[in-house]
Image: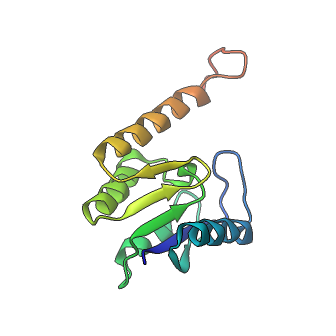
Amino acid sequence: MLTARGYVTPKEFGGLRVPIPAQNIVYRHYSSINNYKLLMPVYDINLEGKYTGFKELLDSELLPNIILFFSFLMFQENNCERNKFLEDCVRKGIKIICIIDNFIIVNDSDIKYIDTVFKLRNIQCNFDFVGEYNEKK
């Protein structure tokens, strides 16, 4: 039986602030229907701009086969930190599943796809809803 560990955070991601109990319910349900043994989740401490849980996911003694994320928007905004985490997972053979996005990361091309999505989101954030450039001060 494959083991899975969820990553939960009180932080806002993608304009959502999903309560931690709701994230855990989604992880339990997803694990149940896929016959995964769900390990205790890793909780991210709410420090502005810091992602404390990512390091813990890969430093634990019992590495899971799968890491569950509610959405890939939970990943770090910083390209270097995000890609290092994803590359470490791929190198260790850990599958990353982003449940509500219906996306699985298992290789380098998946990481490039996520990187492209974040670049496009950053471009989009610089424009308001009518398409005029919104200069950041």
Q: What is the quadrant of residue 18 in the picture?
A: bottom right
In the rendered view, how is the structure colored? rainbow
Q: Residue at x 33, y 62 (%)?
A: 89
**Relative to 103, residue 121 above or below:** above
The spot of residue 64 in percent (x, y) is 40, 75
Residue at x 62% of width, y 51% of height: 100
Relative placement, left or right, of 63 versus 15 is: left
Residue 38 in view here: yes
Q: Nearer the viewer, residue 123 or 61?
A: 61
> Is 89 left, or right, of 66 in this rendering?
left
In this view, the residue in front, 42 or 47, is 42
Give x and y (percent) for residue 34.
Answer: 54, 67
Rendering quarter of residue 14: top right
State the residue at coordinates (58%, 46%). Answer: 101
Residue that protrudes farthest toward the bottom in the picture: 61
Tell me, yes or no, if residue 137 can be seen here: no
Using the image as rendered, state which of residue 64 and residue 51 is in the foreground: 64
Q: Quadrant of the C terminus?
A: top right
Coordinates of residue 21 in the picture (x, y in percent): 73, 72
What residue occupies the far left of the structure in this picture? Answer: 91
Q: Residue 42 placed where, x, y %?
A: 53, 75
Q: How many marks?
A: 0
